Image (cartoon, grey):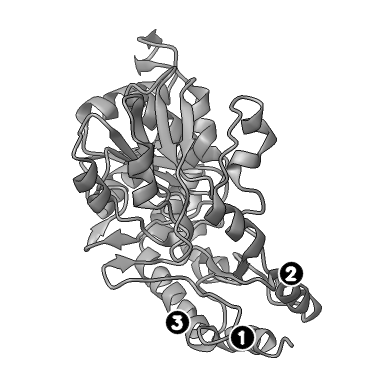
Amino acid sequence: MIQQFDLKKEYAILEDEIQNELKKVFSKTNFIGGENVVSIENNIAKYIGTKYAISCNSGTDALHFSLKSLDIGKGDEVITTPFTFISTIEAIMYLGAKPVFADIELGSYNIDKNEILKKINKKTKAIIPVHLFGNPFDVKNLIKDINDSSIKIIEDCAQSFGSGIYCQRVGSIGDTGCFSFYPTKNLGCYGDGGMITTNSEEAYNVIRKLKNHGSSKRYHHDTIGYNSRLDEIQAAILNVKLKYIDQYNMMRVKIANIYNDNLSDIENIFTPKKTDYRHHVYHQYTISSNIRDKIMKKLEKNSIGSAIYYPVSLEKQKAFKEVYNDKTIYKNSNYLSSSCLSLPMYPHLPEDEVHKICEVIKNIK
């Protein structure tokens, strides 16, 4: 069986190092807000290239707290993509703000900058571009074309840790960057976890309080906050894995290149678009095809895993339709929902297995 994702190979390599760090945590019994949490925040701020990094419980909370720290609230409009995980719009709706969708580009799977520009109006207070599947959206170019600092940019970096644009890391370009450490992410822990990066001292101070019951001092609460803390165990694991993130991302790129070399010229199959100025880190290797279901069944027959991200464009989700009656047809998002397929992708996927996957796809009649 070739799995779509496999954590066991990575853990076998890092086991001794991770277990050594966990023993230190258990011996000190300081499980919440200890030295590993401080360390991972400092290490990620340095890696991403921002003044601050604030840990939290999840990528969803990272988005929620970012929006709240930037004073996004009821009646405000936030432009984002309909082709992403629902947490992106959940964070908007938690605050009573309104998600406004802009369609995507078929080549990159990312939100289309020209569609964003069409949707901006006086109610627009923020934009959440998603660096989908590890492919960075050109935030710099968007900021230049908007030319309005009152419209805040929250980068959804949940799937793109380590990717970059013009040699600048995602998460350091907009007003905030939001990361998920869900186990299958490029940088993942062994539970839930998230991080917000920013250069804004004001946003930093607000988020520090929000994540810890609105408190900046024990038992003194300045606002109503949340319980959203990264624990020492997960922070210790992340500190180990952060040392290998660039190496493992390059292993992903190598696997993607094998897929590209073998699949790019096949009729009815479109491979992920990449450009020279964007560093794609391939959280997923996602193709699109009008024979998607046939490919998926053939892979399954050969004991090869695959996955569909995302089968329903967000404007069609029941949870959204009950609040906003969006009758717009997002043509590209809906096309990809019916045609995209993510092939096996993780750093330690053996090259011979990648070639086997490609051969199975090539032989589909």
Residue with the mark numbered 2: 293
Image coordinates of residue 40 in percent, x first then y, are 35, 46
Q: Residue at x 50, y 72 (%)?
A: 347
What x and y, as percent, mark residue 194? 45, 42
Q: On the rendered structure, is 289 left or right of 193?
A: right
Amino acid type shown at disc 1:
Cys
Reading the image, the residue beneath label 3 is 257
- Cα distance between the residues tagged 2 and 1: 16 Å
Return the residue nearer the eye: 151 or 133. Answer: 151
> Mark 3 or mark 1, which is nearer the start of the sequence?
3
Tell me which label, 2 or 3, sits earlier in the chain.
Answer: 3
Q: CA distance from mark 2 to mark 3?
A: 24 Å
> Above or below — where is 2 with respect to 114?
below
Residue behind mark 1: 358
Quadrant (top left, top right, bottom left, bottom right) of the C terminus: bottom right
Task: Determine the image quadrant of residue 169.
Answer: bottom left
Using the image, tell me which numbered label, if any, was put on residue 220: none
- What's the residue type where badge 2 is placed? Asp
